[in-house]
Image: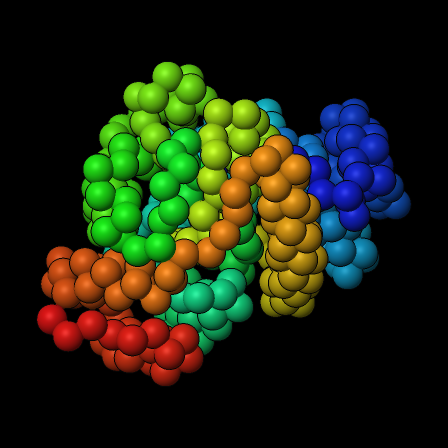
Amino acid sequence: MSARTPRPVLAAVATLLATFVAACGSSGTTTGATSQPRVTLRFSCPCTTDQPQTMAMQRFADEVKKNTGGAVTVTLFPNGSLLGQNVEFQGLQKDAVDIAYAAPDTFAPQVAEMEILLTPYLYTSWSQVEDAYHSADGQKFGPLAVQRLGVRPLDIQNLGARELNLTVTKHISTPADLSGVKLRMPSGPYWAKLGAAMGAQVTPVAFNEIYLALQTGTVEGQDNPVATDVANKFYDVTRQLILTNHVFSAVLPTINDQAWKRLSASEQAAVVQAFKDADSWADTQVQDQQNQDVTLMKQHRLEVYSPNVKAFQTAVLKAYLCDQTWTGQFLPGMLQSVEKTTRAALPTC
């Protein structure tokens, strides 16, 4: 996912790039190692060097090296330089790479229990998604992923809330206001269901064709985190940014289970803590970036506002939570536990 660099981390980009260059000549170890590492972990990501995700990778690598005394080092492969995004997860399973970021929907075909993390409008803040993942039920996802996929998720990282970005000037308050609006959503039944539940006419368009489709009227809107809107200059061909917050996008830093078993118990603890620290840092950068990007959208004369979120939440939750093919895959009792935290009004089906 493309993203514009947040101001607080601009200075870090030059340092990060220098580290990557040095790493390429270090025979597979992170720069600065004073002794031969016992274990070297390969960390792949399609993300670009100026994204919080990528900078979090470097923070993770530095902390692991420090806290294991150099026994474990991490080699970073950003920009899809080791494996492309479309084959990265399969490579993770086959030990072609040791660590990668994986979205919950990547796990969902085999670990369908994770789909509760993807339920639109069940969560109204990123912290609620984190709470669900770190709950007693959420911690069952890891063993299920190990058993069914041979990989182990270690934490969860924020990519930002998804919002609506429209070319039409009609004020959108409720799903009824989106009736007839041609909305581009990512491909797949999950996204088609979400767009329809929000009231729109879902129109499939490839990501690299969104700008032209908005410009020509093939579609009248699209949904993405604001950072993606800014990075792709969608503000040039749209008129509104509607802060629907319908989904909080996430990735799970995930390690191949064979690589995990090569680590001692203390090294495993160091890896987990390093991810927690790096992900916490990245979450802050994502929120700072969103605030900056919303300001930039306003500077490009887009109208920016919040709709009647409750109306959208009611309609969308009914579409998902009254669908037994969706909720039937959740861990028993987890929906009720999440609802106690999020206070989402569960629909009457």
Please provide percent x and percent y for residue 122. 35, 66
Asked if residue 203 is positioned above or below residue 281 in the image, the reply reads above
- Quarter occupied by residue 99: top right
Asked if residue 233 is positioned above or below residue 113 in the image, the reply reads above
Query: Residue 284 vs residue 92: left or right?
Result: right
Taking depth in this image into account, of 107 and 197 the one nearest to the observer is: 197
Residue 66 seen in the figure? yes
Asked if residue 273 is positioned above or below residue 151 in the image, the reply reads below
Query: Residue 162 vs residue 122: left or right?
Result: right
Q: Quadrant of the C terminus?
A: bottom left
- Quarter occupied by residue 57: top right
Please provide percent x and percent y for residue 49. 68, 33
Taking depth in this image into account, of 198 and 134 the one nearest to the observer is: 198
Residue ID at (14%, 65%): 322
Query: Residue 308 vs residue 276: left or right?
Result: left
Taking depth in this image into account, of 139 and 263 the one nearest to the observer is: 139
Residue ID at (44%, 66%): 124
